[in-house]
Image (cartoon, grey):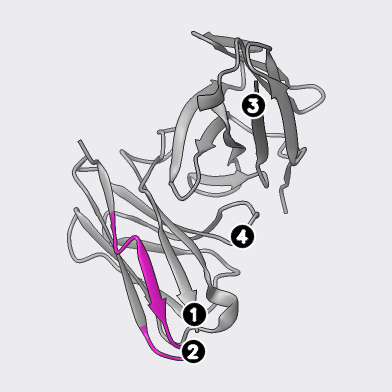
Amino acid sequence: GEDVEQSLFLSVREGDSSVINCTYTDSSSTYLYWYKQEPGAGLQLLTYIFSNMDMKQDQRLTVLLNKKDKHLSLRIADTQTGDSAIYFCADLFSGGYNKLIFGAGTRLAVHP
Amino acid sequence: DAMVIQNPRYQVTQFGKPVTLSCSQTLNHNVMYWYQQKSSQAPKLLFHYYDKDFNNEADTPDNFQSRRPNTSFCFLDIRSPGLGDAAMYLCATSRSGGGDTQYFGPGTRLTVL
């Protein structure tokens, strides 16, 4: 089946940029998403990118998509302690009806 | 304003005792989903409803059932919970299919004793 992989942990200093990486295997992917999950909470949609784009910027968030390498990244500029959370990459699976395939999540820790 | 509501937020049940988790939405979306998220793992789709049309994932155990009595409500029934069913259960909705954004509720954390 299709797969999405992420590194499990990232630690950054407050004020620095964070870059969270994701790879996926679905060669017909149309949409890719980034969700944020704070402790004990559900998933909050941060941003998404359509597969015919290679970059999308939304305030402090920049998404880069390399479709050839099936690589997606999320850059958070000026990372704050409130950004500490788990970040999930998700692929809208082309072989199933509106099914999201999630990665295992990257835990972002922001320290002073 | 809460858009996808899940009750209860925490549920404790005994091994083998049926349990029902509830999800409601104020978005009037056509599609409702149930995901299972075990500790430190990715959320995994169990099934979804498009209106009244039920779509089960091939690897969802028979122990898991769902009901959608109307547009606003969807229930997850676990007929005989095992220790391996302890997880966070996430409900999500989307306006329709395709690339429509899925909006998630806060989840129900299920503990099985």
Instruction: Tell me the residue that label 1 is attached to.
Output: B112
Instruction: Tell me the residue that label 2 is attached to.
Output: B15
Looking at the image, is mark 3 or mark 1 nearer the viewer? 3
Q: Residue at x 71, y 48 (%)?
A: A2
Which circle's residue, 1 or 4, is located before the other in the chain?
Answer: 4
Amino acid type of the residue that numbered disc 4 sits on in the rendered structure: Ser
Are the residues under marks 2 and 4 on the same chain?
yes
Looking at the image, is mark 3 or mark 4 nearer the viewer? 3
Q: Is A72 left or right of B11, judged from the image as shown?
A: right
> Whole-percent x and y of residue A102?
61, 45
> Whole-percent x and y of residue B77?
36, 76
Q: Secondary structure at mark 3?
A: strand
Q: Secondary structure at mark 1?
A: strand
Instruction: Identify the magenta region.
Output: B6-18
On residue B39, the disc is 4
> Whole-percent x and y of residue B54?
37, 64
